[in-house]
Amino acid sequence: MVGAGPAGIYAADILDKSDADVSIDLFERMPAPFGLIRYGVAPDHPRIKGIVTALEKVLSKPNIRLLGNIDYGTDIKLDELREFYDAVIFSTGASADRALDIPGIDLDGSYGAADFVSWYDGHPDVPRTWPLTASSVAVLGVGNVALDVARILAKTADELLTTDIPDNVHQGLKASPVTDVHVFGRRGPAQAKFTPLELRELDHSPNVEVIVYPEDIEFDDGSIAALRASKQVDMVVKTLQEWAIREPGTRQRRLHLHFTTGTSRRCTARSATCPRTCRSCRSTTRPAWCRTRRAACSTWTRTSCRACT
């Protein structure tokens, strides 16, 4: 087994529980196992890191060996593994970001999430320091990793002292001048890929104000279908709607969630911002509360031009 992260260890466990009489060696490039759990989970997520207990039980089995500090391609090669083993499983995962094909991706200050996550998790392959010099930071994407990155940036460093955060990371975050973190999603709230638990956790910090903009709470037919088909999507959207209509707070840092940033907000017919109509009460003044549904207006649509609708 090449790679002793969760995938490799779980694969070893499945083989061990099969009818085959097997002995398994796990080759790991790092000096310690657990891969993504050790170097990919945010330090303020001890619940997720808790699966290490189950992984350790697998590694303690007598027919499973862990061989660390062995780099595939340098210390061992495929021909050598085939010579001594009946089968080889690669469970190395993705160790680097895939570059986005967008203008400006190579400019100074543009980084992939994998590198930043590796830094705050203390991965030995990345530098001990990170250039945290901006007061306002943009995070592209609306998955769980994007929220992890945004949360770590927005929280005060001292909030993380109860975690296993490395000291150099704590010092770097403590010196960070960041006051605003903006998370951008290309599509609408119903297409966000983070979980309800990850989303609600953003609002737990006493120092971070989570801001959602009412004009971003839009639903086309596909979004409405997604809401009806998934309870998880419905929970995410309801949380975002509640945050969109609440009064702004006064916490010292702000985390902004932006949606539908991949579409134009200008009406091609009027050369102005499109008026919108609530499908339920037909109001065009966009109240925070729909008079017909007695709920947050969640079905707004642009009505001026084909490009906007």
Image: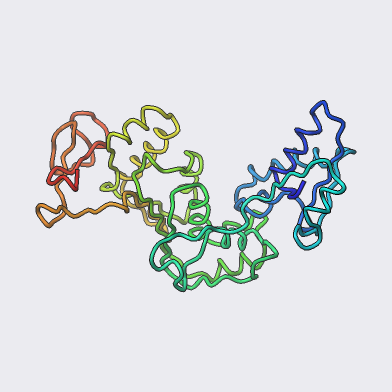
In the displayed structure image, the side of residue 160 where residue 222 appears, left or right? left
Q: Position of residue 81 (x, y in %)?
A: 82, 50
Q: Quadrant of residue 165?
A: bottom right
Residue 202 drawn at (x, y percent): 47, 48
Give the camera-side residue of 269 and 242: 269
Q: Position of residue 12 (x, y in %)?
A: 77, 38
Q: Is residue 109 left or right of residue 305?
A: right
Q: Residue at x 80, y 29 (%)?
A: 17
Please tell me which residue is depicted at 52% across the width and 61% down the height of the picture: 112
Quarter where residue 7 is shown: top right
Judge by depth and name the residue closer to the eye, 121 or 95: 95
Instruction: Indicate the quadrant containing the C terminus: top left, top right, bottom left or bottom right.
Output: top left
In the rendered image of this protein, does residue 136 appear above or below residue 212? below
Q: Classify 291 as above or below 67.
A: above
Residue 51 x, y percent position in the rendering: 70, 40
Q: Image quarter for residue 221?
A: top left
Q: Would residue 299 appear left or right of 139 to someone viewing this image?
A: left
Residue found at the far right of this picture: 62
Is 213 located above or below residue 290 in the figure? below
Q: Residue at x 75, y 49 (%)?
A: 2
Q: Is 63 left, or right, of 267 in this rendering? A: right
Instruction: Please state the total of marks drawn on the protein image.
Output: 0
